[in-house]
Amino acid sequence: MEIILKEDVTNLGYKNDIVTVKSGYGRNYLIPTGKAVIASPSAKKMLAEDLKQRAHKLEKIKKDAEALAAKLEGVSLTIPTKVSSTGTIFGSVGNIQIADELSKLGFDIDRKLIVVKDAVKEVGSYKAIIKLHKEVSVEIPFEVVAE
């Protein structure tokens, strides 16, 4: 079944993308929660007209994301955390802690845009990906150290 996404859905697509999903997923979750609509021919025409009118605004949003990515390019973070005597962390370091450290540096980035691939449960160096736009992402190195 083809649907048009009304908002970004993780691991599926971005707003205004036309994607194919299984019928149950579309009818039972995406459409009732307002995350998508059925991609009928009339809905596709409306989407094309809407995208044509919003192309200038979308270009500005992309340029802003690229400018922020350029500022974030040289940033590396150091995250202090409580550590046991064996070097393992109490709990784990995730996107919330990374967003907090970025806000201390003056970057206001939503934690939902930050992706940490592996579970960070030990002291060491890791990398996080910040998805600023569907075509713009930045890889930020961060180091977890003992408090």
Image: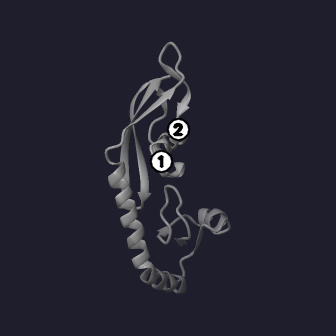
- Name the kind of residue labelled 2 in the image: Gln
Q: How many labels were placed on the picture?
A: 2
Whether residue 89 sits left or right of residue 117 in the image: it is right
Circle 1 is placed at which residue position?
114
Residue 133 % position (x, y): 42, 60
Q: Quadrant of the N terminus?
A: bottom right
Residue 132 % position (x, y): 43, 57
Circle 2 is placed at which residue position?
97
Q: Is residue 140 visible?
A: yes
How many C-alpha atoms fall within 10 Å of the one at disc 1: few (<14), some, or many (≥20)?
many
Whether residue 5 sits left or right of residue 28 in the image: it is left
Q: Secondary structure at mark 2?
A: helix
Whether residue 38 sits left or right of residue 44 in the image: it is right
Q: Nearer the viewer, residue 74 or 22?
A: 74
Q: Nearer the viewer, residue 61 or 5?
A: 61
What residue lies at 52% left-to-right and 52% top-to-bottom? Answer: 110
> Mark 1 or 2, which is nearer the eye?
2
The answer to whether marks 1 and 2 mark residues whose Cβ atoms lie closer than 8 Å is no
What residue lies at 51% left-to-right and 42% top-to-bottom? Answer: 95
What residue lies at 32% left-to-right and 54% top-to-bottom? Answer: 70
Residue 12 % position (x, y): 49, 60
Compared with 54, 144 (above or below) is: above
Compared with 97, 33 (above or below) is: below
Q: Is residue 2 visible?
A: no
How many C-alpha atoms fall within 10 Å of the one at disc 2: few (<14), some, or many (≥20)?
some
- Name the kind of residue labelled 1 in the image: Ile
What residue lies at 51% left-to-right and 12% top-to-bottom? Answer: 85
Disc marking residue 135 = none
Q: Secondary structure at mark 1?
A: strand
Residue 19 % position (x, y): 48, 68
Q: Nearer the viewer, residue 31 or 132?
A: 132
Taking the view exactly as shown, the residue that stands out farthest to the top is 85
